[in-house]
Amino acid sequence: MSGLGGLNKSPNGVVVGLVQLQLPVVVTRADLAAQTERICAMVGKARRNLSGMDLVVFPEYSLHGLSMDTNSEIMCALDGPEVAAFKAACVEHRIWGCFSIMEFNPHGNPYNSGLVIDDAGEIKLYYRKLHPWVPVEPWEPGNLGVPVCTGPNGAKLALIICHDGMFPEMAREAAYKGAEIILRTAGYTAPIRHAWRITNMSNAFCNLAQTASVCMSGSDGSFDSMGEAMFCNFDGTVMTEGGGRVDEIVSAELRPDQVREARAGWGVENNIYQLYHRGYVAVKGGAQDCPYTYMTDMAAGRYQLPWNDTVQVTDGTSCGFDAPTRGYKGPER
C-alpha cells in the first residue's frame, strides 16, 4: 500500500518523508543558526534520498531541542532568518517541507508553532500548538485553531503537534475541516511509545484519514527521543514505521484519493459522518443533535469534571515554572 516507501509512485499518490532527526542542544544564537543549517541540509538529503518525494516532515523541537528554554534571544518569527532559510531550502530542492519553531510572543510565553512551506517558498499552513504538554511545557496555548491547507497533488493537509494527538477532538477537527492527511510532529520520549502508536492508529481510523507522525530521535545528553516515525491508513492499520535510528527518513506513498473514496462510499464505520447522523436506518437522516454533555458544557463555558476538585496538578510549578497570573485572551481576530 505504501508503494515501497514511495519508490513506486502512483498518479494520485503523495510521497511523504518523516525525518527522525537527531535531538539537538540549542542554547545560543550561534547554536540556532547551526541547527537551521542542519535542517536545511536534511531537506537536501530528503530530495536526494527519493526523487519523487513531495513533502518532508521534521519533528517538533527539531530547531530548538527539548530544553524548554524561553529565552527571547533564540525565539523565532515568521519573518526571521530561520524561516527564510527553510523557505529557500524548499525552493532549492523543489520540495514541500513541514517545520517546527518556537515563536516569539510579545504578549506572553512563546508559541510552539508549525509551518508547512510549499516548493515555491510560500507558507501554506501556519499552526500554533493548541495543547502544550502540561505541566512540562511552558508554551502559550495556541489561538489559531486547526488550519487545513491544500498540499501536493491536491491533498488536504493538517498539522497537529505532539500532545495534541492525545485528544481525539484534535484529529476530528482536522478531518471535519477536510484534512485527508494529518501530520503529527513530536519530541516524545520512550515512556509515551505505546500511547503514540495507538493514538496515531485511532486518529486515522476514527476519521477515515491517513496519519503521518514522527518524533525527534537520539539523545541530547539529558533526554532520549524515540523516533518512531509511522504512517497509518484510514482503516487504522500501520502502513510503514521506523524505529529509533537517528536521521533516518522513513517514507511512504499516501493516497488521499482513496480516503475520499472511503469517506464517500463506506457505510459501516463511516464514523465521522455517522457522529451527526446516528441511527439513520431508523430515522430519516439520522438524529442530528448533540447528546454529548462535555461538548455543550465546553461551549457554554461550564466544563467541569466530576472529580475536578481532586485534580492535584493544575499549573507548572511541579516542573519548576512559576504559577501564571494572567488569563487566556482567546483567538486572534
Image (cartoon, grey):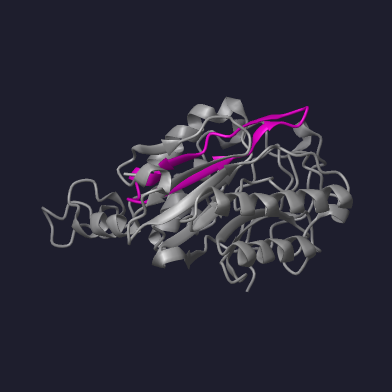
Farthest top residue? 191
The quadrant of the picture occupied by the N terminus is: top left
Q: Is residue 115 left or right of residue 254?
A: right
Residue located 62% across and 30% down the image: 189
Q: Is residue 276 visible?
A: no
Q: Where residue 123 sits: x, y (%)?
A: 61, 68
Q: Is residue 20 visible?
A: yes
Residue located 41% across and 65% down the image: 153
Residue 211 drawn in magenta? yes
Residue located 62% across and 67% down the image: 91
Q: Where residue 6 sits: x, y (%)?
A: 41, 48
In magenta, the rendered stretch is 203-231
Give the camera-side residue of 20 and 279.
20
Residue 73 drawn in magenta? no
Q: Is residue 313 above or below residue 86?
A: above
Q: Where residue 67 sits: x, y (%)?
A: 78, 39
Q: Is residue 258 above or below residue 69?
A: below
Q: Is residue 178 above or below residue 129?
A: below
Q: Quadrant of residue 14?
A: bottom left
Give the camera-side residue of 50 and 318.
50
Q: Is residue 171 left or right of residue 84?
A: left
The quadrant of the picture occupied by the C terminus is: bottom right
Q: Quadrant of residue 223?
A: top right
Q: Is residue 178 above or below residue 192?
A: below
What number of labels is visible?
0
Q: Is residue 171 left or right of residue 287?
A: right
Q: Where residue 45 sits: x, y (%)?
A: 61, 49
Farthest left residue? 282
